[in-house]
Amino acid sequence: MTIDRARVERLTRELLEAIGEYPDRPGLKQTPARMGELYSEFFAGVGADAAEPLARTISVTRGPAPDTLPSGAVLLRDIRFRSVCEHHLLPFAGRAHLAYLPGEQVVGLGALVKVVEILAARPQVQERLGEQIADTIAEHLDTRGVLVVLDAGHGCVTMRGGRQPEASTLTIAARGDYTDAAARAELITLISASTGSAAQGIGSASQGSVPGAHG
């Protein structure tokens, strides 16, 4: 989907007027154009196919390195992501940790990053984002299990409401073998050992991990 930048610019002017500002004053004159560019970037994932990056797979038995067949999970930690909370259109940002148990087909690690980026680049809530990432990988990649852990800080809590700058939200989405807590315990330990701290990028923040409990 192509963002209607001209319309975003017009609506930004209206918004500035609605709050009592003057869109043509020097400090705000370029703001509508900047917002058009910003929204084109932040919401580039609206209407995009998040499964497309997973279309190119590699056979683990007939591929270029059959002697390196994975015997356990493939875990990609500390994928930096940012999204926009659909409740207040304020940013939330943090790290995604993805793991899957390969079947016959594996995928390049960069494809997993792209799945996160596409799904995050639309109005979101963190709980749904994690579930969508897990579903996309489970449905479009040959896996026996998928685990998605998101750790993020939310601007709607940092800058308004409770204003808790040190809080972060942790969500877990599991599919297949990893729906069993014991099966995912090792991965959770490995993820916990990550040096990444949630909420960096928007000055920390978030709400508790209660589904739907957004600002």
Image (spheres, grey):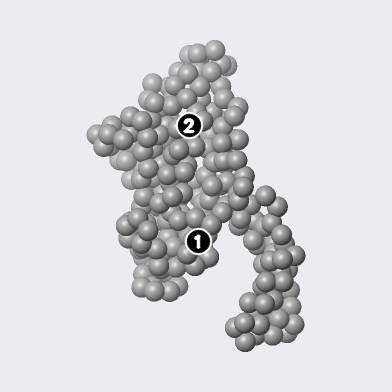
> Which residue, as the protein is rendered here, is positioned at the far left?
182
Q: Nearer the viewer, residue 79 or 115?
A: 115
Residue 159 percent across, percent down from the top left: 45, 73
> Could you tell me if residue 79 is visible in this image?
yes
**Residue 89 in the image: above or below residue 133:** below
Residue 52 percent across, percent down from the top left: 60, 35
* Marks 2 and 1, how far apart at CA: 25 Å
Between discs 2 and 1, the one toward the N terminus: 1
Residue at 36 percent across and 62 percent down: it is: 213
- The numbered mark at residue 139 is 2
Residue 34 figure quarter: bottom right
Residue 193 figure quarter: top left
Q: Is disc 1 surrounded by few (<14), some (14 to 19) or many (20+) residues within 10 Å? A: some
Q: Amino acid at mark 1?
A: Glu
Q: Amino acid at mark 2?
A: Glu
Report the number of numbered marks: 2
Residue 72 percent across, percent down from the top left: 37, 25
Q: Which residue is mark 1?
A: 86
Going by the image, does 104 lie left or right of 73? Answer: right
Residue at 51 percent across and 22 percent down: it is: 105
Mark 2: secondary structure? helix
Residue 67 percent across, percent down from the top left: 48, 14
Q: Nearer the viewer, residue 212 or 23?
A: 212
Residue at 32 percent across and 60 percent down: it is: 208
**Residue 142 in the image: above or below residue 89:** above
Going by the image, does 104 lie left or right of 192? Answer: right
Q: Is disc 2 surrounded by few (<14), some (14 to 19) or many (20+) residues within 10 Å? A: few
